[in-house]
């Protein structure tokens, strides 16, 4: 419950250019694949991450590094993961927007996205 790990940082710190460096890396492995699920009671083929719907959450503390390995396990579609929310200052190559900041991952390809949680709070991805 202590915020002592933040050192001189606090909730009022300007997160535009400053953040703590915890030295902690949060690692995730995402397999994007077709899965038959029934979220509304009718079975249907869905594009999922790790056969889950909704997909897994990424959790990190302010100043942690995130490392997300994404593998395309689809049979015929290219894909990528766009991390809606985390700031991508000077690392837009890690933003995951297919056709804008990267080429799609072909079936069977994997890519590891790396970014730092430079802002605190909750965000969503799509
Ligand atoms: Cu976005």
Image (cartoon, rainbow, N blue to C red):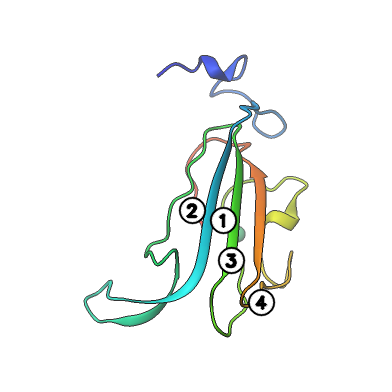
Q: Quadrant of the N terminus?
A: top left
Answer left or right for 75 relative to 99: left
N-terminal label among 3 and 2: 3
N-terminal label among 4 and 3: 3
Answer few, some or many: residues within 10 Å of disc 4's Cα (few below 14, many 20 plus, some between 14 and 19).
some
The residue at which mark 2 appears reads as: 124
Asked whether the viewer can see residue 32, the reply is yes
N-terminal label among 1 and 4: 1
At x 66%, y 76%, the residue is 106
**Separation of marks 4 and 3 at Cα, in angstroms:** 9 Å
Asked if disc 4 and disc 3 are in contact, CB closer than 8 Å, the reply is no
The residue at which mark 4 appears reads as: 106
Residue 72 quadrant: bottom right
Answer few, some or many: residues within 10 Å of disc 1's Cα (few below 14, many 20 plus, some between 14 and 19).
few
At x 54%, y 35%, the residue is 120
- Does the residue tagged 1 have its C-beta within 8 Å of any atom of ligand 1? yes
The residue at which mark 3 appears reads as: 71
Q: Residue furthest left?
A: 41
Judged by depth in the image, the label closer to the viewer, 4 or 2, is 4
N-terminal label among 2 and 1: 1
Asked if disc 2 and disc 1 are in contact, CB closer than 8 Å, the reply is yes
Above or below: residue 14 compared with residue 2: below
User: Which numbered marker is on residue 24?
Assistant: none
Helix, strand or loop for disc 2: loop
Judged by depth in the image, the label closer to the viewer, 3 or 2, is 3
């Amino acid at each position: 419950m202590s915020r002592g790990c933040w050192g001189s940082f606090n909730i009022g710190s300007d997160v535009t250019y400053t953040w703590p460096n915890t030295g902690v890396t949060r690692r995730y492995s995402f397999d994007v694949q077709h899965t038959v699920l029934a979220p509304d009671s009718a079975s249907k083929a869905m594009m999922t991450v790790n056969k889950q719907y909704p997909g897994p959450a990424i959790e990190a503390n302010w100043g942690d590094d995130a490392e997300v390995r994404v593998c395309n396990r689809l049979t015929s579609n290219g894909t990528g993961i766009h991390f809606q929310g985390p700031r991508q200052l000077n690392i837009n190559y890690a933003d995951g927007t297919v056709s804008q900041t990267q080429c799609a991952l072909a079936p069977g390809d994997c890519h590891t996205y790396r970014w730092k949680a430079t802002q605190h709070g909750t965000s969503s991805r799509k």
